Image (spheres, helix red, strand yellow):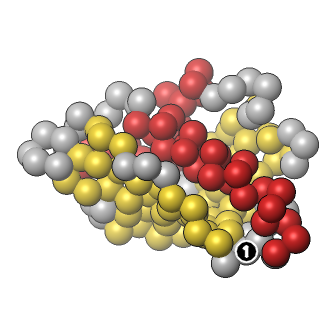
Amino acid sequence: MSQYESSVKNIPFPQAKVYAKLEDLNNLEGLKDKLPEDKVKDLTYSRDEATVNVPPMGNVTIRVVEREEPKCIKLEAVGSPIPVNMWIQIIPDGEEASKMRVVAKAEVNFMLRAMIDKPLKNGIEKIAEALSLISY
């Protein structure tokens, strides 16, 4: 199992407000215009799932599997060629701000690791960056 972590992102909103927005995947509407159209297409979502078409992999669904209010949202990839679990960690940074980090664990065999290690690291960082740009 390989672990990938984003850098810590500073968010100028309180932890509870950030958690309230991220725990309901319907709120991904605010991300649509921040996603690269050539890499991500057809984003659909509900409270517990978000599906996106990622060429050349096809449709990948991210499903919420656990919520730990107000500090963590655990997700898993469904339909991904590689089993992936992801956590969005949110910690308070004073009364009016918070910090966020995205962590993913993927079952990647040794042969594939060399090919997908860098894209997975970059992908996790881009997810964290996009989440940090939302107006909470």
Residue ranking furthest to the left? 95
Query: On the rendered image, what quadrant is the C terminus found in?
Result: top left
**What's the residue at 51%, 58% (across, down)?**
5
> In the drawing, does residue 43 fall left or right of residue 79?
left
Observer able to see residue 61: no
Amino acid type for the residue under numbered disc 1: Glu
**Picture coordinates of residue 38 (x, y %)?**
79, 25
Residue 32 position within the rendered picture, expressed as x and y whole percent measured from the top left:
60, 27
Q: Is residue 110 above or below residue 34?
A: below
Decide if residue 122 is on the left or right side of residue 72. right
Image point 74% across, 24% down: which residue?
Answer: 37
| Circle 1 residues within 10 Å: few <14, some 14–19, many ≥20 | some
**130 above or below 57?**
above
- Residue 19, compared with residue 53, is above or below; it is below
- Quadrant holding the N terminus: bottom right
Q: Which of the pair 100/120 is nearer the observer?
A: 120
Residue at left offset 72%, top offset 48%: 119
The residue that mark 1 highlights is: 107
Picture residue at 69% right of the left edge, 26% below the top: 36
**Res 112 → quadrant:** bottom right
The mark tally for this picture is 1
Q: Is residue 116 left or right of residue 127?
A: right
Q: Whole-percent x and y of residue 93?
A: 17, 49
